[in-house]
């Protein structure tokens, strides 16, 4: 006899019978098919996936690109279809792009030689770009020298790098005092008699004057 039949067949039940009927109804509730009260599986799986990825389905952006050779400023690029290309890191302090700045006096000793302010940006791939401003007339276009090339590790204790121009001529020899300070060992084949340093800057300078030039392939 089904639970519904029992209720309709005996509408007038004494108190003791009512208690027994309540127990019988509880047993009927437990006889429902497995999963009768469960939330559909597809719905719960979908909710869990959305919570893990975020409601908007956003994914972490790829590494910040320095923008060498690009017409667009440096920015984070997100790609959901193709994985970001891995960059070969040639030195741990340069696992990310860094810009260094410093002022160097005239080193040649020639009359009329000007002090210069050097802005140097190093990329993890091995490329560098530099802007040198002659300080005797900094606003003149002729007083701004822009260069690019490849850097390579020439020593490890402490870490030393050499900047080479595209023509393979040496531009500078630098030592990492720490991750944020470079000491100038030699610049334009001249060795300073005093210690001069380039200090890391908070913002990356991509040296936009040569942004249209093709990035170098530095091994």
Image (cartoon, rainbow, N blue to C red):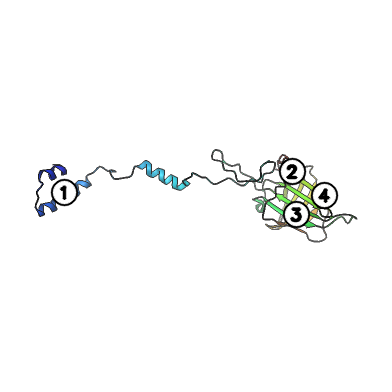
Q: Nearer the viewer, mark 3 or mark 2?
A: 2
Which tag, 2 or 4, sits closer to the chain's start?
Answer: 4
Dot 2: within a 10 Å radius of its alpha carbon, few (fewer than 14), some, or many (20 or more) residues? some
How far apart, in angstroms, are the residues tagged by discs 1 and 2?
86 Å
Q: Nearer the viewer, mark 1 or mark 3?
A: 1
Quadrant including the N terminus = top left
Classify mark 3: residues with Cα within 10 Å, few (<14), some (14-19) or many (20+). Answer: many
Label located before the other in sequence (3 or 2): 3
Q: Tell me which numbered mark, 1 or 4, is placed earlier along the sequence.
A: 1
User: How many angstroms separate mark 1 from mark 4 (CA)?
Assistant: 99 Å
Which label sits in the foreground, 2 or 4?
Answer: 4
Q: Mark 1 = which residue?
A: 24
Name the spot of residue 59 as percent of width and height, x first.
Answer: 52, 45
Mark 4 neighbour class, 10 Å CA radius: few under 14, some 14 to 19, many 20 or more: few
The spot of residue 83 in percent (x, y) is 56, 41
Residue 43 rendering spot, x and y as whole percentages = 37, 42
Query: Which residue in the rendered view is the most extreme toward the right?
Result: 111
- Numbered disc 4: secondary structure: loop
> Residue 183 is drawn in which quadrant?
bottom right
Task: Identify the residue position indicated by label 2 in the image.
Answer: 210
Label 1 vs 3, first from the N-terminus: 1
Residue at left offset 75%, top offset 54%: 174
Q: Which residue is mark 4?
A: 140
What is the residue that sits farthest to the bottom in this orientation?
Answer: 194
Q: Which residue is mark 3?
A: 174
Marks 4 and 3, the one that precedes in the sequence: 4
Q: CA distance from mark 3 to mark 2?
A: 23 Å
């Amino acid at each position: 006899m089904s639970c519904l039949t029992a209720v309709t067949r005996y509408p007038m039940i004494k108190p003791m019978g009512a208690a027994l009927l309540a127990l019988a109804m509880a047993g009927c509730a437990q006889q429902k098919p497995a999963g009768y009260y469960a939330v559909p599986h597809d719905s719960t799986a979908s909710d869990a996936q959305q919570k893990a990825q975020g409601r908007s389905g956003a994914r972490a952006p790829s590494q910040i690109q320095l923008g060498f050779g690009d017409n667009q400023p440096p920015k984070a690029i997100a790609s959901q279809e193709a994985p970001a290309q891995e960059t070969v890191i040639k030195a741990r302090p340069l696992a990310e792009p860094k810009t260094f700045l410093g002022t160097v006096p005239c080193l040649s000793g020639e009359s009329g030689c000007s002090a210069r302010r050097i802005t140097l940006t190093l990329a993890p791939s091995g490329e560098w770009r530099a802007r040198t401003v002659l300080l005797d007339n900094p606003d003149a276009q002729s007083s701004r020298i822009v260069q690019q090339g490849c850097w390579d590790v020439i020593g490890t204790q402490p870490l030393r790098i050499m900047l080479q121009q595209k023509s393979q001529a040496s531009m500078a020899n630098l030592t990492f005092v720490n991750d944020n300070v470079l000491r100038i060992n030699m610049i334009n084949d001249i060795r300073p008699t005093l210690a001069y340093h380039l200090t890391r800057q908070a913002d990356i300078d991509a040296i936009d004057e040569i942004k249209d030039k093709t990035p170098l392939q530095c091994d």
